[in-house]
Image (tube, rainbow, N blue to C red):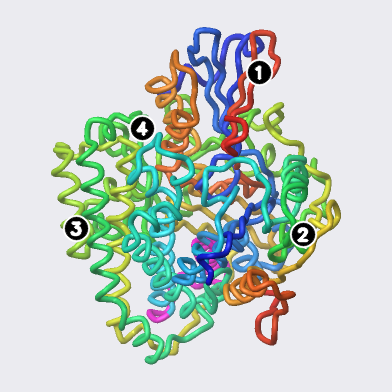
Amino acid sequence: MSSSLEKADDPTKLRRVVIDPVSRVEGHGKVTILLDEAGKVHQVRLHIVEFRGFERFIQGRPYWEVPVMVQRLCGICPVSHHLCASKALDLVVGARRLTETAEKVRRLMHYGQMLQSHALHFFHLASPDLLFGFGSDLAKRNIVGVAAAFPELAKQGIMLRKYGQEVIRITAGKRVHGTGAIPGGVNKQVTAAERDELLAPLPQVLEWARGAVKLVADLHLSHRAEYDRFGTVPSSFLSLVGEGGKLDLYDGTLRARDHAGQILFDGVDPQDYRSQIEENVRSWSYMKFPFIGSLGPDVGWYRVGPLARIQNCDFIDTPLAEEARQQFRAAFAVPENGLVHAPLAYHWARIIELLHSAEVIERLLHDDALLGDELLAKGPRAKSGVGIIEAPRGTLIHHYEVNDQDLVTECNLIVSTTHNNQAMNETIREVARQYLDGKEPTEGLLNHVEVAIRAYDPCLSCATHALGKMPLTLEFVDPSGALVERLVRDGESL
Amino acid sequence: MASEKKKLRVATTSLAGCFGCHMSLLDIDERLLELLKLVEFDRSPLTDIKHCGPCDLGIIEGGLCNAENVHVLREFRKSCKVLVAMGACAVNGGLPAQRNHLDIRDCLQTVYMTGTGIRRGFIPNDPELPLPLDRVHPLHDVVKIDYFLPGCPPPADAIWHFLNDLLAGRTPTLGHGLIHYD
């Protein structure tokens, strides 16, 4: 499954096209494409160009600082990092089981995060491609264009995101970089008044979320021929799966399926993640390349995120999202255990999760245990802990070792977008084969490459946790290696 | 009245930041639709414009951690009449500057060579990767900054208040409650 377009035989003889930065994604990345004189594509790479070094400078810090430090990896899903670090450190403080209230408050925070992030990605960032077309007018291809052409839709997107952010504010203290979770539980009780404040808009939120599922399904089905094929590459899938095989975004055990849908492993305890997942490094990106160890680096790459999760689980335990999942499977007519591999199906899966998140929030708000006042648990200290959570973009792994002086001695982070590194590279190589080969790459054609990357909702902020950021660039180099053209989208160079 | 005015052209970018300040900008919620009547976006994570053109206002999140950040910052300074450092990283370097007391080689080795679970490790090195700076710098180390908006991130109300002052032609002032640092 590894691609021949990863490395050109003789890059110095080729023309280089660069997309820099990749836009309407979070973070900084660039894409380079090498072409010969006939326009044949020889090499395509997504580079993550920034390095920040969190894994190193966390070392030597007291463990209790970690949940508020590491969330600064990413302002879009800070809650995911905040909770994932807290889950790992729960084990260090011996809280193998949280109080019922603490677990429910954390879950509420997490599903609020999921709702706001999925709304942001679809409405604010990706929807212009789907609503206006992949090669449509650059000037309109953004949220401003959506607000002008589809004002009601833009408003719904803004209000859905707002609702998720309000759930976070109430559970974490503030919308971005809150402080609600601490090792062993949470530090803030949810009051009845706060619960009621969140209950009031819920019927409207659920209605908008159902509308969004229908919109995304209709968009996919009305462009069926193109969407099913666009950049499609088969891969394995990895996610957490909850009790009894249900979709659970906060906790569970690891399950992976191969490209045919057969289980590769299941029920793997998060503490044992290293028995299954290893990482490699490439010279041309600061983002590492994880793979399933038993399969090896060439064929062991896999995908995470909404498309992995809704196909890896056996069912969804909320009725509206389960119905939407069934419709998704029926639409693709996938056989028992079969898998949909189209990257653009990520959008559909993501919005099913948005609906699911709204339903879970409703369930939690109606649970009296949410308002309890037992917030902290503890037990015998341990020296290490691994936390795994399903962040909006996929499986997130935090691993800390802590010494007797309470200082972190080792930190390993595998963020969601990193799991999709090889997959995004393979997908844009396939898009290059399908759309760029033999053609003069115009701005509209190059946006196809970005559409493929956006399907994964990459968070290049997270992915540069090493020391970093993500822009995309396209440059052309003549056969002698000299720069012929640098394609940028400022309207001046095109 | 606003419809008669020319829209203010605004560019935004995130350098060595986490996008949290941009999230806080979006946290003005439905007021975003009001803002869109008064401003138009040039380069921004929200548009597909890749390089900053002539703008009235540039808003930058994040500090400087590599050569590319410095290049983009200079492009913004050249193109924008007014340049704003938004958030802790742009103002002070922020959390990424935690690496400033460490050796960059040591950081790179820990992450790419000696860390947990790496089968074949080495430090990435390619002409396509901008070179990391030895230290993370705030924006005003390199160019003149006209306004500083503190906070990690600055609250949405502070950003809203600040933009409204600018749009109305007033010198922006943030009153009590709008400046905080966490």
Q: Say yes or no: labels 4 and 2 on the same chain.
A: no
Left or right side of A140 for A216: left
Looking at the image, which is closer to me, A235 or B176?
Answer: B176
User: Is A110 situated above or below A137?
Assistant: below
The quadrant in which the C terminus of chain B is found is bottom right
- Front: mark 1 or 4: 1
Amino acid residing under circle 2:
Gly
The chain that hosts pointer 2 is B
Do the numbered discs 3 and 2 sit on residues whose CB atoms are within 8 Å? no
Instruction: Give me the C-alpha separation between circle 3 and circle 1.
Output: 52 Å
Q: Is label 1 on the same chain as label 2?
A: no
Q: Is residue B153 left or right of residue A388?
A: right
Tag 2 residue:
B93
Q: Which span is picked out in magenta? A: A78-101
Disc 3: CA contacts within 10 A as few (<14), some (14-19) or many (>=20): some
Q: Which residue is mark 4?
A: A235
Amino acid carrying mark 3 in the image: Glu
Q: CA distance from mark 4 to mark 2?
A: 40 Å
Which residue carries the number 1 mark? Answer: A484
Residue B152 in view here:
yes
Local secondary structure at mark 4? loop
Pinpoint the chain carrying mark 1. A
Residue for badge 3: A322
